Image: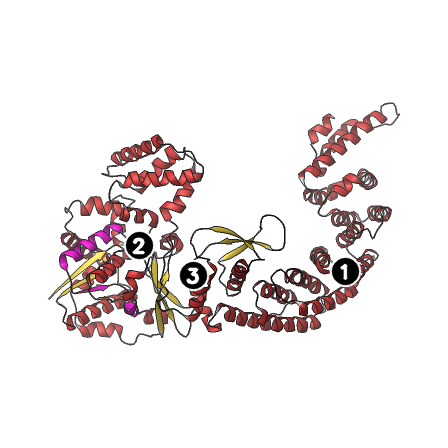
Amino acid sequence: MTTTVLGIRHHGPGSARAVRAALAVLDPDVILIEGPPEADDLVRHVTALTPPVAVLAHAVDEPGRVAFWPYADFSPEWQALTYAATAGRPAHFIDLPAAVTLAGGDERPPAKEQALVADPLGWLSQAAGHDDPERWWEDVVEHRLGGEPLELFAAIGEAMTELRSAAAADGWVLDERDRQREAAMRRGIRAAIKAGHLRIAVVCGAWHVPALTELPSAKADADVLRGLATARTRATWVPWTSERLTLASGYGAGVAAPGWYAHLWRAPDRVAERWVVRAAGLLRSADVSVSTAAALEAVRLAEATAAVRGRSLPGLSELTDAVQAVLCFGDATPLRLITGKLTVGEELGEVPADVPIVPLQADFEALCRRLRLRPSAADKDIELDLRGETDRGRSALLHRLRLLGVPWGTVVAARGEGTFKEGWHLRWEPEFIVALIERARYGTTVQAAATSVVAERAARAEQLPDITRLVEAVVLADLADALPAVTTALEQRSARTGDVQQLMLALLPLARVLRYGDVRQTSADMVRGVVDSLLIRVCAGLPASSASLDDDAAADMLGAIESAENAIAIVGTPDQRVAWRAAQHAVCDRASAPGLVTGRCVRLLLDAAVLEPEEAQRRLARALSARDETAYAVRWLEGFLRGSGLLLLRDQVLWQLLDDWLCGLHGEAFEEVLPLLRRSFAEFAWPERRQMGELVRASRRGFRSSSAGAAVDWDLDRVRQILPVLAAALGGSGAEVAGG
C-alpha cells in the first residue's frame, strides 16, 4: 500500500499539468482531493460541467450562509477530478466538512502568515524575485527536473517541510482551523486505507504536504475534531466566473490573472505569440488599428525584455509591457480592455439541468431557457419591445429578480420614444445564485417568491412613497396577485398620512403605473381610485403645508411639488388640473410661503397659461422690490427661473426688471447675492448663458452710446471693475465685456 501526496498551487496551470502527469504514472485506485466531503455526491456530474464552476454549500436552516470551492479547467483539483472520471477511478473530498465551516466563524491567520499559508509556492517565487509564480514554477522547478512529476512533488514536499520548520522556529503556530482541516484530511486518508485501496493519491495545497505525509495516531486527530459544531447543509455545483477567481474579488486562494493562466493551460506551444495575437484581435474589434508587423514587434520586445530580466521565456509582465508599448502606443486606456477581457477574462461556467438545485433556481433556469435570456459574465445591453410576448416576459423576469434582490439587469434609457420600449444593462454575478437560494423560502417559482417578498415589504413599509414605489415595481414585474395586497396597504397608509409632501411624492410612481399598465397588459384600475383620493388631499393641504419653511424644508417641498406636477401631467383629468393650479395659486398669494416655492409656483402657472405674462412681471417686480429681503428675492428668482433661462431671453420686461434690481444693489448686498445668483444661473444650459452674456455686452454698448453726450458723472474705472463680475454671474466673458 502506497500513499503519494501531491502538493499543488491552487489554480496553477503548471500544477495542473504536473498532477495529470503524476496520476498517469501512479495509476491510483483512489484519488483524495482537498475539499468538502459533502461534494462527494457531486463528483458524478464532473464530465457534464463546463468550468469555471464551484461547489456551493449552504446551511439548510439559514440559506444565506454559504461557502464556495471554485475550480477552473487549469485548477489541479479539477484535473484530478476529470482524470478520475475518465479513468473510472473513485474520487473523494477529504477536507473539513462544510457542515463545520458553516456552523462557525471563518478564523483566518494574521495578514503576515496568510500570504505564506494560502500560497506558499507563490511566496517562494516572490522570495526568489519573480512576479509570475507560474513562470517561476516552469523555469525553476519543472524544467530543472526534466519534467519528472513524482520527483517534482517530492521536491515540493521537502521544500514545504523546510518552510514549515523555519516558520515554526520564528514563532509561527498552526492556526486552529488549519489544525482541524489537516486532522480531517488525515482521517480521510485513513478511511481510504481501511477501505482496502492500495495506491492512494492525495491532491492538496502544498502547505499541507508535511502534515499528511506522516500520520499521527487516529486518537490524536479525533481529539482535534471532537465537539465541533455542525449545521445541516446541502451542496451543489454552480456556475462561476473568471473575475471571481481573482484575488481582487476577495477570494482568498485567488490568482491575479485567471485569463492568463487559462491561456497557459490551453496554449500547446508559442505562448507569447498566441497571447499577442489574441490581444491584437481584441484591439482590432475595438477599432484600434494593429498591424501584423506591430504584433511581431511586440513579441520580439517581450522576448528581449525577458532576456534582460534573466528569464528564459516572457511572462505576463513582459507581454503586458510590450503590448502597451507597441500595440497601444504607450496608452493605458486600450490596455485596460486587454486586462479585463484577456488577463482576467469573462468566462462563465455552465452547469447542466440534472444537477440537484433548489426549486426556485430550477424555475429561474427554465425561464431563462424559455425566454432565451442566457446569463453572461460580460456586460450586455438589450432593448425590449413590450408589445411582444417574449420581450414582455423578459422584462417581467428581470423586474421580479430585482424584487428578489438579484439585480441581474439595470434599467437604462432606450433608444427612440414610446412607452413600449425598455432598455436594460445586464451583467451576471455568481453571488446571484446565493440570493436565489436564500429566497427559496419565499416560494418554489420566481413569480411566487417575488409575490411573497412584495407582500412582506408592503406590510413592513412605513413611508407612503415606499409603498407607491412598490406598486410601480409590482406592475413592472407583472405580479397581478400581489397588486391587491399592495394597494390595500397603500390605502391604509395614505389614510393615516397627513404629510402633504409625502402624498405628493407618492403620486408619480402611481401615475407611471396608470400610464404603463396598458402597455404591459396589466390591469391597474384599482390604483386610479387611490390617485384620485391623494390628489384631493394634496390640493387641499398644499397652501398650509408651504408656509414658514426654512431653506432645506423649502427645497424638499419644491422637489415634491415638481414630482406632483409631473404626475398630474401624466394622468391628471381636466378637473384635477384645475384644482392643482388653484392650490398653486393659493401658495403664490400666501405671504408666509418661502421665496423658492412661491417663485416656482408662479413659473408653473405662467407655463400653464394660468397667469398672464403681465401678472408674472408684477409678481417678480414685487419680490425684487423688497430691499431688506435680498435673500428672499434671490430664492424667489431661483424658483422662478429653475430649469430654463429662455424665459429671461424672450421676455425683455423680465430681463430689464432683473437688470434694474442688480444695478440698484449696494456693494454689500451685491456681494451677498452674487454666490446665490451664480448657483441659479449655473443650472442653465451653456447656450442660454452665452446668449445672456451677449445681452449684457449689447446693453453695455448701448450704455456707452447713450451716455456719450450726457453730463453724468460716471466713474468708468469702477464701472469696468464690476462689469466682468456681473458678466461672469450671467455666463458671459468678463474680458469681452470689459473690452466691449
Q: In which quarter of the image is residue 67?
A: bottom left
Q: In which quarter of the image is residue 686?
A: top right
Q: In this view, does 405 lie to the left or right of 299?
A: right
Q: Give the range drawn in magenta.
A: 13-41
Q: In this view, does 590 lie to the left or right of 33?
A: right
* Amino acid type of the residue tagged 3 in the rendering: Glu
The residues tagged by marks 3 and 2 sit, at their Cα atoms, a distance apart of: 25 Å
Number of marks in picture: 3
Point out the tag, 1 or 3, that comes first from the N-terminus. Answer: 3
Q: Is residue 60 above or below residue 273?
A: below
The residue mark sitting in front, 1 or 2, is: 1
| Most common SS among magenta residues | helix
The residues tagged by marks 1 and 3 sit, at their Cα atoms, a distance apart of: 46 Å
Residue 115 disc label: 2
Residue receiving disc 3 = 431
* Amino acid type of the residue tagged 1 in the rendering: Ser
Q: Which residue is drawn at 73% across and 69% down?
A: 533
The residue mark sitting in front, 1 or 3, is: 3
Is the Cβ of the residue at disc 1 closer than 8 Å to that at disc 2? no
Q: Is residue 312 above or below residue 252?
A: above
SS at mark 2?
helix
Q: Which residue is drawn at 72% across and 43% down?
A: 677
Considering the image in quadrants, where does the C terminus appear? top right
Point out the tag, 3 or 2, that comes first from the N-terminus. Answer: 2
- Most extreme residue toward the left is 1
Tell me, yes or no, if residue 256 can be seen here. Answer: no
Point out the tag, 1 or 2, that comes first from the N-terminus. Answer: 2
Residue receiving disc 1 = 546
